Image (cartoon, helix red, strand yellow):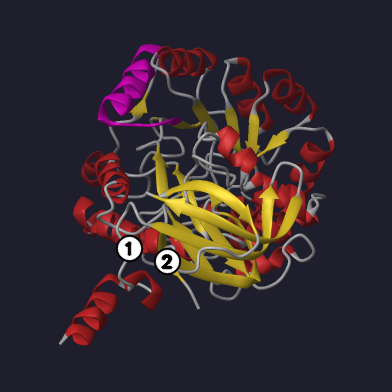
Amino acid sequence: MKSWLVAAAVAFLGLTPAAAQVEPAQDALTFVQAGRLLADPATGRVATDQTVVIQNGRVVRIENGFVGEGQGRVVDLRDDFVLPGLIDSHVHLLGQQGPTNRIDAVTMTRSAQALEGAYYARVTLEAGFTTVANLGANSEAIFALRDAVARGRVPGPRIIASGAGISVHGGHGDSHGYRPEVLEILRSEAVCSGADDCRRAVREQIRLGADVIKITATGGVLSNTAAGLGQQFSNAELEAIVEAAHSMGRRVTAHAHGADGITAFLRAGGDSIEHGTYLDDEGIRLMRQNRAWLVPTLLAGDFVARIASGPNNFLSPAQTAKALEAGPLMLDMCRRAHQAGVQIAFGTDSGVSAHGDNAQEFALLVQCGMTPLEAIQAATVRAADHLQVADEVGALRPGMAGDLIAVSGDPLTDVTELERVTFVMRLGRIYRAR
């Protein structure tokens, strides 16, 4: 009977067998024996034969040698490379791009979206990403998912959520291509026009529970309208958004492709740029001057360009034209930004590409000029700095979250090893194991 119940739990939750293991009491010690450990992601220092001691979901200490036998639960990763849980600074957990998206928009309830998100949250966690920023989603659904994960009710990564993205009427982030009465139903409360209305939209998202404010400063590839990829908010609207968010303790990140929208947002005091396709010298200068972050989402650009040019293209004509225009430019943009010393954090825009494929971004970052270590730093210490959670995640030190992953090979030599994660632990609980 007991084995049947465990199997049923595994089937119902969709978990790997390791995730269904009986966990020790929270105050018990767990000893993770690591053959190789990325002891300091900031410098790339690797230590051999280490034991990470975890209690109550936190790293207590790291000891030399393999210890812990008879003292608590022992996790044998002696043949593996262990590193902190990965961070994806740009995901959309509530769905995934595909041929049914337009019908899904008018048939899925918010509850259905939240449950869909629970599935993709698990997939993301099992891929080794223990923290994500969800930038753009129905506010009610994503905040419910974020809070359920935080309470331990749903397996998933720690979620930093913006809720609905702030967008202009008719712009990227608004609804397109439906009958007028349907458009009104689908329209988000975060769509605005004019400085005062955009202040309202920001404050409303904060009231609903936003951790960060996400805006669409320019047109976007996947909005079903031929409105280009340039600036869509006025300068006055951008200034109002940033002022309203900062005055209430929230940072602002901008979906931005066109150079005009990038520079206008940065001049308004914005904190980070998502995508950055047409980033020019002035944009790079402003990013360095403002210490702003770039989240290049190379996987999204690569994915939409492949879909748009392939035999099974499910994008609309307007989406196809923008995908073919923007996608191929992103690697060169990332290369120029990296060479210029712009701060880069790892982010994929997953939900455009498939959830669980997040680690494919690493190889693209290396193609744009990063070393494997720099790419890993972008998904650990740098992403933690960007998301302002560096005291919690991004490294394995006493007092920090017990979030760690393992791979068989050496990701500092071959970064694609991170596409083959074999072990995932978050807050001391095992969610994936061989």
State the predominant SS element of the stretch in magenta.
helix
Q: Where does the image place residue 432, in percent across and percent down from the top left?
A: 45, 70
Which disc is residue 73 wearing?
A: 2
| Quadrant of the rendered image containing residue 97 | bottom left
Depicted 33 relative to depicted 340: above or below? below
Q: Is residue 413 left or right of residue 3?
A: right
Q: Where does the image place residue 241, in percent across and percent down from the top left?
A: 45, 18
Disc 2 marks a residue whose amino acid type is: Arg
Over which residues does the magenta segment extend?
195-213
Where does the N terminus fall, quadrant-wise?
A: bottom left
Note whether residue 88 is visible: no
Q: Which residue is mark 1?
A: 24
> Mark 2–mark 1 contact, CB under 8 Å?
yes
Q: Where does the image place residue 433, in percent across and percent down from the top left?
A: 48, 73
Badge 1 local density, few (<14 within 10 Å), some, or many (20+)?
some
Depicted 321 relative to depicted 249: above or below? below
Residue at 71 percent across and 51 percent down: it is 375
SS class, disc 1: loop
Q: Where does the image place residue 67, in percent across and percent down from the top left?
A: 56, 63
- Inter-mark Cα distance, 2 to 1: 7 Å
Residue found at the far front of this picture? 70
Note whether residue 412 is visible: yes
**Mark 2 or 1, nearer chain start:** 1
Residue at 79 percent across and 56 percent down: it is 367
Disc 1 marks a residue whose amino acid type is: Pro
* Magenta highlight on residue 427: no
| Quadrant of the rendered image containing residue 188 | top left
